[in-house]
Amino acid sequence: MQLDPLFKPVESLPGIGPKLAELIARVTGRENAEETRALDLLLLPPHSLIDRSRNPGIAFSPEGAIVTLTVRVDRHQPAPRGRSNVPYRVFVHDETGEMALTFFHAQSAWLERQLPVGETVVVSGKVDWFNGRASMVHPDHMVREADAATLPTHEPVYPLTAGLSPKVLRKAIEAALPLVPDLPEWCDPHLVERQTFPTFAGAVRQLHDPRDPVDIAPQSPARRRLAYDEFLAGQVSLALVRSNLRKLPGRTIATEGRLRERVTAALPFSLTRSQEAALADIRADMAGKDRMLRLVQGDVGSGKTAVAMLAMAEVVEAGAQAVMMAPTEILARQHFATLSKMAAPAGIRVEILTGRMKGRERSEALERIASGEAGIVVGTHALFQDSVSYHDLALAVVDEQHRFGVHQRLRLTSKGQAPHMLVMTATPIPRTLVLAAFGDMDVSQLTEKPAGRKPISTVTIPDERMGEIVARLRAAVMEGRKAYWICPLVEDSELSDLASAETRHAHLVRTFGPELGALVGLVHGRMSGEDKDRAMEAFKRGETRLLVATTVIEVGVDVPDATIMVIEHAENFGLSQVHQLRGRVGRGDEASSCILLYHGPLSETAHARLAILRETEDGFRIAEEDLKLRGEGDLLGIKQSGLPGFRLADISVHADLLEMARTDARNLTLADPQLATPRGEAVRMLLYLMRRDEAIRFLRAG
């Protein structure tokens, strides 16, 4: 098959072993090295460009600028013995002046071979001036004059991770580029002409061979072409999903609402107006002829779970079953606890099913699901494994949909006779994004918070006052209160001065002293599922009272008696992400506070963004402001929050392309529902390329 070379494991490229493959997986956003393919490197866009064509001479090199210089090597000055902190210097000159090439922890034999005395060499790197003397620390490139042509004049700059050097990554991309085949055109020919799109292969080559900053801008023809491809793949797979979901008639669910009323009567709060409205929408959808496909958007704490429970009660009363799928084990167990409590007054049996359940516990659960004894089943993606069969599945509720691919929600709905679909998200999403992620779903918004929720007081404090914050936290923990401390990273990285959770945890344990130090817990995304659960449970039970965490706790973790949230380097998080994190406190009846620690000086935008968080707790306003202020595309902190993972498309810049892709996908799937025409066949290739092939498997099944 033409695409096979692109799906070669990244480890099969020259010079890439298991360790490098893991690092490449990290920068290309893949789960692990086994999943990482040559294609992932080819679709990794550079974020900036180094121009190495400037050759001003040593004396005329501006401070901090990257230049390329032709110089003669005068002498070597190794570091004195036993003084490894003193750099190795190589002195060079050209007709305009002198300069030192500076190396730390250098191997003298290697440097003597690279830079022989008396030889003319070409070096490229950043020039620094100190006391009137020029120096270049660790030049990026050093070649003999005869090999000067091998130096790149323009060099794309890619995202990196600790341990992966720009040179190694660039080499890997260059090894992958010859694998790009010429593929049949899947775009509409009129569109290609109108938009002056290069071919797919041409666009990939241009992406990695920029000659000018304009070439790497989101609006360059190559980038627009690849962005369109990404949108088109997404929209075609959504269109296929939709046409298949609509193909089967809906199941009419209409009841007297006895169970719903029992659950409502036992709730400790009364429903808000928007909860009532969302429920009315859901009941109308389920009573109709078509299948329900509804998205419920509600801010943190707006009562989405109660809405889902009441919808599920309707289904159970009609003699059928409902499932609720959560993205993580922690969340599934939490939903199980909440729903069991809500369902008890109506006598509804709630079952849990997760991937970690084994042996007898699992087989008994599967039996209760198959017999229909379990009216509601809560779980992770274990819910749609082949071994799970339902008695009569009529409603699937998916929590935090953006954590699941389209195909996962398909496999879940294929478990019943065309079950209704209810998707819930706490991420407030602007309209364009709803279209990109969910296609044409009907949307209900929960706009109020349940009665009794206390507002959260939010303050911004520079990190030089961290000592005060730690002292206040220590006092709060002594009083028995619970707090979160959020850090941006898991472990320290040479490339970043952001705080890591592991370092901060060690620092707080030290500062709190032997007795209180034991009350400081740690949870982050690299821990195993079991360890994460244990850390969260210990915090819930009060065995730890201060939990140092990365954003792994962002979605749905519920500890009602936690009242303090510290977010370190708050200026580096997406606004909506800070808002979601802040929503982890203020869930009980005590007043709560959120402290945003920032590292000054702040840019104007960062100031404006932190001010919005101080002013409002309205997630929809925050999302819209984030969109306005950032514009450039890490919409709502999508990269951190896991929303549609576009790698080349940027919704704030390419919104026009998204609209075109939607129209094109709709027309194409209407005219060629099986993608059997030559263009349809080419679009299948695109779906494989963009890892949307689950939609093709579904096509075959449908």
Image (cartoon, grey):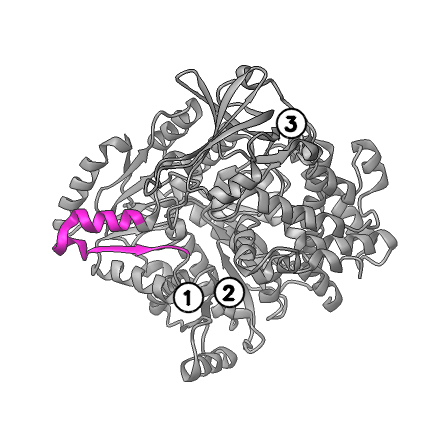
Give the image location of residue 26, x and y in percent.
Answer: 52, 52
Q: Which residue is mark 3?
A: 213
Distance CA(mark 3)–CA(mark 2): 62 Å
Above or below, 476 against 700 in this view is above
Q: Amino acid at mark 2?
A: Thr
Instruction: Say which residue appears at 16% left-offset and 40% top-offset.
Output: 472
Marks 1 and 2, Cα distance to the nearest angstrom?
A: 9 Å
Element type at mark 3: helix
As measured in the structure, the alpha-carbon distance from the residue carrying label 3 to the one carrying label 1 is: 62 Å
Question: Which residue is under mark 2?
Answer: 255
Within 10 Å of the Cα at label 1, are there few (<14), some (14-19), or many (20+) other Cα atoms? many
Q: Are marks 1 and 2 in contact (CB under 8 Å)?
A: yes
Task: Give the vertical position of 149 relative to 186 (above or below).
Answer: above
Q: Quadrant of residue 604?
A: top left
What x and y, as percent, mark residue 637?
48, 40
Q: Earlier in the sequence, mark 3 or mark 1?
A: 3
**If the image is split into quadrants, where does the C terminus sit?**
bottom right
In magenta segment, residue 509: yes
Foreground of the two, 663 or 41: 41
Percent across and percent down for residue 541 are 23, 62
Q: Main secondary structure of the magenta part?
A: helix
Callout 1: SS: helix
Q: Quadrant of the N terminus?
A: bottom right
Q: Position of residue 253 (x, y in %)?
A: 56, 64
Mark 3 and mark 2 in contact? Answer it, CB < 8 Å: no
Chain part drawn in magenta: 503-525
Determine which residue is flagged by label 1: 259
Assess disc 3: are there few (<14), some (14-19) or many (≥20) residues with their C-alpha within 10 Å of its C-alpha: some
Q: Secondary structure at mark 2?
A: loop
Disc number lying in front (3 or 1): 3
Which disc number belongs to residue 402?
Answer: none
